[in-house]
Image (cartoon, rainbow, N blue to C red):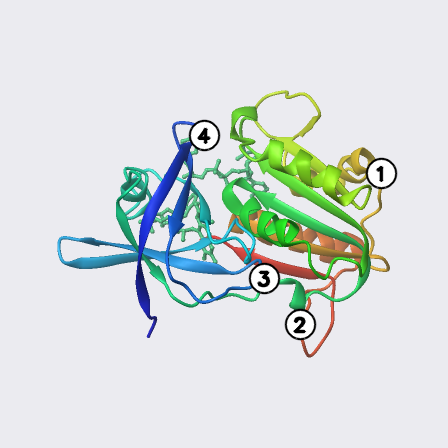
Amino acid sequence: MANWVTGKVTDITNWTDSLFSIKIQAPIEKFTAGQFAKLALEVAGERIQRAYSYVNAPDDNNLEFYLVTVPEGKLSPRLATLNAGDEVLVTEQAAGFFVLDEIPDCQTLWMLSTGTAIGPYLSILQQGADLERFENIVLVHAVRWGKDLSYLPMMQALVKKFQGKLRIQTIVSREKWSDSLMGRIPTLIENGELESAVGLPMQAKNSHVMLCGNPQMVRDTQQLLKEQRDMAKHLRRKPGHITSEQYW
Ligand SMILES: Cc1cc2nc3c(=O)[nH]c(=O)nc-3n(C[C@H](O)[C@H](O)[C@H](O)COP(=O)(O)OP(=O)(O)OC[C@H]3O[C@@H](n4cnc5c(N)ncnc54)[C@H](O)[C@@H]3O)c2cc1C
Ligand SMILES: NC(=O)c1ccc[n+]([C@@H]2O[C@H](COP(=O)([O-])OP(=O)(O)OC[C@H]3O[C@@H](n4cnc5c(N)ncnc54)[C@H](OP(=O)(O)O)[C@@H]3O)[C@@H](O)[C@H]2O)c1
């Protein structure tokens, strides 16, 4: 059973009509970058709870979550109406294995995300620990529209901070957008456009691929990497090249 603590909303940023970030102060136990908490609201006597990845680094007490309002969803539209000063329940302990401790050493670490699933990577990169063992890190954010690239300024600041180790690539699927590829992650891997834009190969001998977000993207990309790049799912008992987390 999860322990719940009461958090106070300190800030809401509405990036678009459907994307928002929520900052919360809450007495949680320390989490590991890449993990998620559960947020909950009491609605008509029922506690509605869902998982949300931390965006902030574990050392930062301003807990931050990046959300999309799922139309007809039970919780996300309610979280979208919160204001600074409102209360929200947060699990005291974080959960999840989408963390660097689970990733083997490699030359190039690919961090691929769709939509709000850029969050865990931003937490890992803002924390900045245990990254020496990768020569290159590539952060890829795939969204529908250019306006959905909410954290691009933070991504660009991280590129500066890492001085050559980190490369970023945005993908916009539904319109042409400057400095972005157009299409979907698996197609852009299959046709070589992603690697050519980034300037690094995605090969079993030198890469590990993290996948996060849309479950169909995760499944399709995994399948492609297995069939065309001879990559396998990474398990503790059987090391491989792919680590994933699905959001629904
Ligand atoms: C480990 C983990 C981490 C997560 N982290 C985040 C996060 O950082 N930010 C975030 O916004 N969400 C995140 N999610 C998704 C989140 O937990 C909820 O599923 C989401 O907010 C929808 O909840 P809801 O109650 O509004 O909709 P529900 O009433 O639960 O769902 C309605 C339907 O919408 C579909 N659905 C659920 N989520 C999405 C989605 N994001 N896009 C499209 N369809 C969806 C489901 O198929 C479901 O049947 C995470 C999920 C997991 C498992
Ligand atoms: N983003 C918005 O503007 C917006 C606005 C209102 C409501 N919503 C709601 O929010 C929810 C989540 O939307 P979202 O835009 O954050 O996430 P999303 O639907 O997962 O889309 C994010 C990115 O993932 C891509 N994608 C989807 N399926 C894929 C697959 N099988 N393989 C590879 N890539 C795939 C999308 O490409 P495609 O464009 O090709 O699908 C898009 O580039 C949805 O329920 C949506 O209705 C979103």
Q: Earlier in the sequence, mark 3 or mark 1?
A: 3
Tell me where residue 186 appears, x and y as whole percent.
Answer: 67, 43
Q: Residue at x 45, y 30 (%)?
A: 15
Q: Earlier in the sequence, mark 4 or mark 2?
A: 4
Q: How far separated are the C-alphas under marks 1 and 2?
A: 28 Å
| Amino acid on which disc 4 is placed | Trp
Left or right of 40? Residue 101 is right
Q: How far separated are the C-alphas under marks 4 and 2?
A: 37 Å
Q: Are marks 3 and 1 in contact (CB under 8 Å)?
A: no
Quarter location, residue 71: top left
Q: Residue at x 84, y 43 (%)?
A: 200
Q: Which residue is mark 3?
A: 98
Q: Which residue is mark 1?
A: 199
What crowding class fits label 4: few (fewer than 14 Cα within 10 Å), some (14-19), or many (20 or more)? some
Assign a secondary structure to mark 3: loop
Q: Are marks 1 and 2 in contact (CB under 8 Å)?
A: no
Q: Which residue is mark 4?
A: 15
Q: Which residue is mark 2?
A: 235
Circle nearer the viewer, 4 or 2 = 4
